[in-house]
Amino acid sequence: MSRSALVENVIAMLEDAGFLVSDRCAIRPKSFDVAARRGRDTVLVKILGNIDAFDNRTGAEMRRLGEYLRATPLVIGLRTRDEDLKPGVVYFRHGVPVLSPDTAMDLFVEDVPPLIYAAPGGLYVNIDSEILEDARQEREWSLGKLASELGVSRRTVSKYEDGMDASVDVAAKLEELFDAPLTSPVEVLDGTEDIRDNEPTPDDPDVDPADESIVTVLTRVGFDVHPTERAPFKTISENEQRRQQMLTGHSEFTETAEKRARIMSSVGEVTRTTSVYVVERATREAVDGTALIEESEMEEINDADELRDLIRERAEESAD
């Protein structure tokens, strides 16, 4: 399957599952292909045939964007260079969960979450420690007795009951012994940080020197500004209460800039953020929902409310 066909299939799957899906980010470099939202769940999706192409810089960028946009970064792919991705398994690359299209279909369309995740050493499952302990005590088995049945140490069984995950083989043996389901799903949209050992959000990249004047204005009027490296926008900005978030672009107003502004508008609709593109000279008020502001206008803005009102005014005038 070509990557273009794979992207189209994934977008169709998300739409069938009831997600609002953004326009495809078709301008390079790009850290994600589409943003999608359903209810309270927002995802930033990278779609790849071979997931080995997903590098550390892109993973770090997606994790930062996920943190600032309150979204789950996610890769949907077909294979590694060595094998196809297994259905029902969550993989990880650079701290980002990875699913096969079949696993994504089960999760988003059929509402059947995966039970298995891949980690160094093999495939693992989440053991419901309380159910396991209750089942053992109801059977009146000691920790040593269960350890003997499993062929592991007493300490290992104690760790299972303290919340340590188990290999697929051990989990299958446990469920066979107690004739009861003991595993719990992998929470792809909320909770995978537990499997990643709570890795911190990667640091922001340095500000592009060409954007320093824009970042200075945004910081002056009260925004925390997060530069990006591979997104269709230059920064994500948020005020102290994180009640106002904004995507910002900055360049000459070329055909490519117009495409970026359209993508920003679409991503902003999904992520519930405003978007603004700063240009040297604007020939219109906005591109779709992305307001256009000239550099000279930007430098004269004194507070966040003034900027918010200007963005709203430009977007509304464009829509009329």
Image: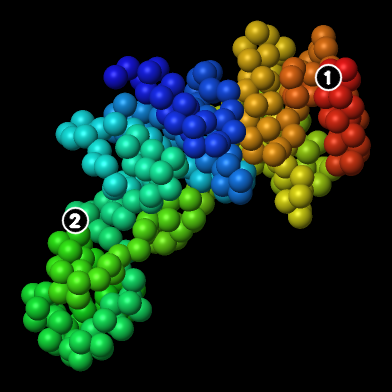
204 or 110, which lies in front?
110
Tell me residue 270's x, y (percent).
64, 35
Q: Nearer the viewer, mark 1 or mark 2?
A: 1
Residue 268 location, quadrant: top right
SS for tag 2? loop
Quadrant (top left/top right/bottom left/bottom right) for the N terminus: top left
Tell me residue 34's x, y (percent).
52, 29
28 to 68, vertically: above or below: above
- The reply to whether residue 56 is visible in this rendering is no
Residue 186 location, quadrant: bottom left
**Residue located at (37% from left, 23% from top):** 6
Which numbered dot is residue 8? Answer: none
Q: Amino acid at mark 1?
A: Ala
**Residue located at (21% from left, 31% from top):** 81
Residue linked to disc 2: 121
SS for tag 1? helix
Residue linked to disc 1: 319
Tell me residue 273's x, y (percent).
71, 38
**Residue located at (61% from left, 46% from top):** 39
Are discs 1 and 2 less than 8 Å apart at CB? no
Left or right, residue 50 beside residue 282:
left
Quadrant (top left/top right/bottom left/bottom right) for the C terminus: top right
Tell me residue 147's x, y (percent).
13, 80
Left or right, residue 60 beside residue 238:
left
Left or right, residue 31 beside residue 262:
left
Q: Amino acid at mark 2?
A: Gly
**Residue located at (21% from left, 66% from top):** 171
Q: CA distance from mark 1 to mark 2?
A: 55 Å
- The reply to whether residue 266 is visible in this rendering is yes
